[in-house]
Amino acid sequence: MVGTEALRAHLIEARLAGTIATLREKSLGRYRLFAARDPRVLLGLDPERDWPLGEVLRLMGQKCGVSVDPAHTSGPDVIDPDRTIAALDGFAERLGEAAGRRAPVLLGTGHPHRLLEFYAALADALSSAGCTVLTPAYGCRVDIATRFGLRTRSLDYVRGVALMREAGARGAPGTGGVHTHSPLPVRTALAAAADAGGPLPGLVIGDHGWVCGAGQLGIEAIGLADTDDPALFVGQAEGRVSAVVPLDDAVPSVGYRPLARYVLNRAYLSR
């Protein structure tokens, strides 16, 4: 079990919250792109209204604790650890509710080298609670736009968690696993589940396009997000994402273990 004070100290020590590695200039650049509705940062979300830069910045200040001063343009970003903990409590509540009704769940990550272990712990606990952990579209190939052009990726599942691999890659989770923000993987998985006659997930758990892509389609979604991913927080503000936890999403995977223990304990899913 991980108590609140111990968790807060860990968040700061591991740089999951407090002063993080994500740079202010990177976050501001992505806020500008979001305000311009650039698909690269919408992550599958189609905002219901315009979100000017100033409103995005204020929202991120409210949800994450980043500076709302537009003149603050450089240096490391900051996340308020107390907001992270409060969001983890909300995340755990949705997890526990899904477990209580034994909802089918779909888990997916665009950070297979960092967050796979966190989601796998949730998948194991949900499965033990009687939830069906879905694995639709296993092996399907998806063409995803990258900074190097269009690349074909393969949809794989490791310990119940979806991830994208380089086409043809096999083996351990880290082999060929790719970082992606695209909503195409979750759209592919949901379409395959629907074509097979279901079940469809009652809850999608993940990050990046997995959360925004599912939420945009009306499926309850919860996830983790860094300060340079405003789409998830806008999705939450507009009512299409149920819970978003602000944290650095790219620290070594061991850093997320106490978070998984805390969430599962709060959701009454600890074993």
Image (spheres, grey):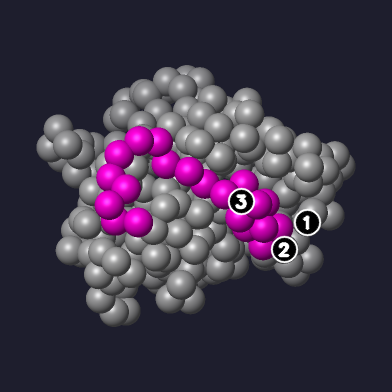
Q: Residue 99: horizontal and vertical position, in percent?
A: 74, 61
Which residues lie in the magenta part? 69-90
Left or right: 38 with respect to 219? left
Crowd class of label 3 (few under 14; some 14 to 19; many from 20; radius 10 Å): many
In the rendered structure, are the residues bearing label 1 and label 2 in contact, judged by CB atoms less than 8 Å apart?
yes
Q: CA distance from mark 2 to mark 3?
A: 14 Å
Q: Earlier in the sequence, mark 3 or mark 1?
A: 3
Judge whether 152 appears above or below 254 on screen: below
Query: For the residue marked with disc 1, what is the amino acid?
Result: Ala
Q: Residue furthest bottom?
A: 49
Q: Residue 49: horizontal and vertical position, in percent?
A: 29, 79
Q: Earlier in the sequence, mark 1 or mark 2?
A: 2
Task: Determine if the magenta segment contains residue 89.
Answer: yes
Task: Determine if the magenta segment contains residue 65.
Answer: no
**Residue assigned mark 1:** 267
Residue depicted at 48% across the width and 43% down the height: 78
Q: Which mark is residue 84?
A: 3
Q: CA distance from mark 1 to mark 2?
A: 6 Å
Crowd class of label 1 (few under 14; some 14 to 19; many from 20; radius 10 Å): many
